[in-house]
């Protein structure tokens, strides 16, 4: 039982549930309704969508496993209570699970390409595996580039569903009822939100882990710039995101989506402003850990908002 618990800790099962929820919400509350409105079947049927989501989850699990493999010494300092590598799961098994999950994620991607009208899903999955490996082995310890890479991959978890419908985007003139531009707007709206909120959280996590990172020669932003400058960088991104969200909420009020606007304001924007306020006075690792958790909650409420954007009450 301890081994099973450690295995699920290794692959970060709550984060994998986030990936699953994001893709299910986007597919069934945004993509499929748009195609249904145009009386079309989208490229991914239910089974193909299941396979695509499974491949993304496998790749994410592989990334978490290899990250813990390379972070063993740092985690001994930053979070010894959560350590599973070399404690309950050997490093050899961690590598094996990384290889298994990576292979399955890539293989499923190529299978989807061969059985549907998608393009390059297998190739993109292979690139994601490679980038996550490089991130864990090296880029995570570099200034900012690792944070940006993780944020881009997080956004890609949404954009890959948009990409999967390329068959219709290339021939949409034939299907006059399909609002391709609306799908584009929704896709990049949520991908943009995912990128910025992930970047905010990644930098906050670097501030939380600064002690262990500094001891092992990492060059993360808090180490290179110092805590105060890193806070300013993060606060600027919070202001940018909050401003964009407020503009969107004003817009949806003008088109009569009051429930959507109220939800966005109380469950996304206000908590984001709370992060801003608490970050100003944060000093300890526990402070930054609490902020990281709050940002994760905002990610969740952002995902749930997909219901309102497609079917405003």
Image (cartoon, grey):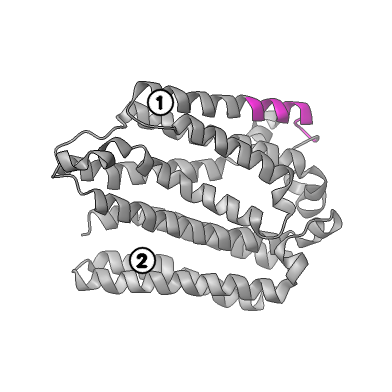
One can see residue 20 in this view: yes
> Residue 299: x and y, percent?
47, 57
Alpha-carbon neighbours of circle 2 within 10 Å: few (<14), some, or many (≥20)? many
Q: Which mark is residue 264?
A: 2
Q: Which quadrant does the N terminus fall into?
A: top right
Q: Nearer the viewer, mark 2 or mark 1?
A: 1
Q: Earlier in the sequence, mark 2 or mark 1?
A: 1
* Mark 1, residue position: 112
> What residue lies at 42% left-to-right and 41% top-to-bottom?
160
Magenta residue check for 92: yes
Q: Is residue 44 above or below residue 303?
A: above
Q: Nearer the viewer, residue 104 or 13?
A: 104
Using the rendered view, name the quadrant where residue 21 is placed.
top left
> What residue lies at 82% left-to-right and 60% top-to-bottom?
214
Q: What's the distance in space between the residues labelled 2 and 1, CA to CA?
A: 35 Å
Dot 1 falls on a residue whose secondary structure is helix
Could you tell whether 300 is left or right of 292 in the image? Answer: left
One can see residue 90 in this view: no
> Residue 164: x and y, percent?
36, 37
Magenta residue check for 25: no
Using the rendered view, name the quadrant where residue 95 is placed.
top right
Magenta region, main secondary structure: helix
Q: Is residue 47 above or below residue 286?
A: above
Could you tell whether 116 is left or right of 297 in the image? Answer: left
> What residue lies at 62% left-to-right and 41% top-to-bottom?
131
Q: Nearer the viewer, residue 160 or 31?
A: 160
Looking at the rendering, the stretch of residues picked out in magenta corresponds to 87-99
> Residue 5: x and y, percent?
65, 34
């Amino acid at each position: 039982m301890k081994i099973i618990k450690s295995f699920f800790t290794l692959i970060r099962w709550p984060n994998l549930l986030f990936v699953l929820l994001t893709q299910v919400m986007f597919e069934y509350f945004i993509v499929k309704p748009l195609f249904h409105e145009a009386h079309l079947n989208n490229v991914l049927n239910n089974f193909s969508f299941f396979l695509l989501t499974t491949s993304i989850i496998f790749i994410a699990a592989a990334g978490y496993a290899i990250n813990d493999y390379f972070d063993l010494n740092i985690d001994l300092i930053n979070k010894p209570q959560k350590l599973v590598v070399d404690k309950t799961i050997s490093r050899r098994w961690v590598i094996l699970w990384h290889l298994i999950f990576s292979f399955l994620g890539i293989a499923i991607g190529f299978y989807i390409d061969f059985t549907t009208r998608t393009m390059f899903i297998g190739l993109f999955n292979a690139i994601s595996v490679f980038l996550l490996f490089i991130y864990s082995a090296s880029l995570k310890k570099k200034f900012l580039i690792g944070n940006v890479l993780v944020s881009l991959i997080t956004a890609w978890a949404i954009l890959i569903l948009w990409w999967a419908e390329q068959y219709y985007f290339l021939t949409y003139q034939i299907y006059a009822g399909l609002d391709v531009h609306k799908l584009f707007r929704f896709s990049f709206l949520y991908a943009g939100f995912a990128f910025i909120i992930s970047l905010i959280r990644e930098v906050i996590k670097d501030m939380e882990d600064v002690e262990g990172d500094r001891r092992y020669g990492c060059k993360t932003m808090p180490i290179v710039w110092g805590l105060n400058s890193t806070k300013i960088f993060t606060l600027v991104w919070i202001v940018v995101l909050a401003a964009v969200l407020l503009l969107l909420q004003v817009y949806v009020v003008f088109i009569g989506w009051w429930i959507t606007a109220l939800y966005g304001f109380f469950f996304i924007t206000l908590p984001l402003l709370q992060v801003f306020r608490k970050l100003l006075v944060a000093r300890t690792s526990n402070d930054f850990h609490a902020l990281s958790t709050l940002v994760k909650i905002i990610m969740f409420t952002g995902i749930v908002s997909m219901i309102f954007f497609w079917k405003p009450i």
